[in-house]
Amino acid sequence: MNNFFDLSLTADLLGRDFVQQAILAAALLGLLAGLIGPFVVMRQMSFAVHGSSELSLTGAAAALLAGANVGTGALLGSVVAAILFGVLGQRTKDRDSSIGVVMAFGLGLAVLFIHLYPGRTGTNFALLTGQIVGVGYSGLLMLVVVSMVVGAVLAVTYRPMLFATVDPDVAEARGVPVRALGIVFAALVGLTAAQGVQIVGALLVMSLLITPAAAAARASRHLPRAPLRCRSSSQRSPPSAASCFPWHPECLSRSSSP
């Protein structure tokens, strides 16, 4: 128990590459969630986030069956699912039913792909619980690229996106491409969810994207300030999830062994 209060152990941990990469990944994911979360809450797309993260399993299973990279398959599966949600769920009253149908079909395909795969699948599906200490340099680089893409798209489309989010009917009457913006935003949600499942897992992505944004919406009545509040709380969420990792010397030796 004294190992948890040993500053020399903390310094040793912070000097290791995988710990530094995990901290950077947590910070970037918190920033990404802070950017996208307020729009998710205002658009009432919480179920879409859950569906996108769960259907990353379908993409991962398809990639596993095809012999491709599981992480890339999860990314494609999440983005395709999010775009389908955006296309089929343009109207709020049809959104939940559309997501439910796509989720049922996609998870059925995932079970089929896993059944058809002749090898072992248990070690390839850490996507459900995440593996923040296993991000690696390539995963961190992908997260940086996705964060830059999401940030750039939101910076360019912020005003019309906000208008279409707050009042889509009036925005459409004023000539704002509401449908196209909805599909673009759904793709951004898919990218964010796909990155989240590899770090905190599919089971916690929804909490990371929704909880800070909902709290920020309660704390701020000024819409442009909500993302700022959301980012400050989102930055604390991934490190909290990362703290669940058992920083015991035995676990450390297993993680650092080849």
Image (tube, rainbow, N blue to C red):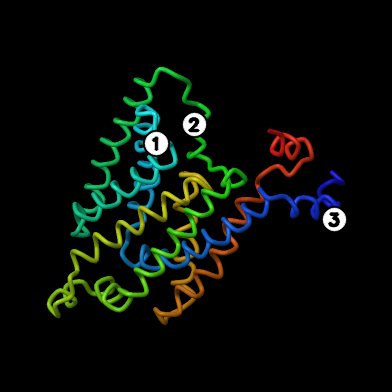
Residue found 44% across the figure and 72% down from its top: 217
- Three-letter amino acid code at disc 3? Leu
Type of amino acid at the residue the image marks with label 1: Ala
Residue that badge 2 annotates? 124
Tag 1 and tag 2, C-beta contact below 8 Å: yes
Q: Gap between marks 1 and 2, in whole Å? A: 8 Å
Which numbered circle lies on residue 60?
Answer: 1
Q: Amino acid at mark 2?
A: Asn
C-alpha separation, residue under disc 2 versus residue under disc 3: 35 Å
Which of the labelled discs sits on residue 192, or is there none? Answer: none
Residue that mark 3 sits on: 7
Q: How far is disc 3 from disc 1 in space, using C-alphas?
A: 39 Å
- Residue at the spot x=27%, y=43% of the render? 100
Task: Identify the residue at horizontal 24%, vertical 55% (top origin).
Answer: 86
- Reading the chain from its start, which is encountered first: label 1 or label 2? 1
Give the vertical position of 110 relative to 220 (above or below). above
Rendered location of residue 13, percent (x, y): 76, 50
Query: Nearer the N terminus, badge 2 or badge 3?
Result: 3
Q: Whole-percent x and y of residue 55?
A: 35, 41
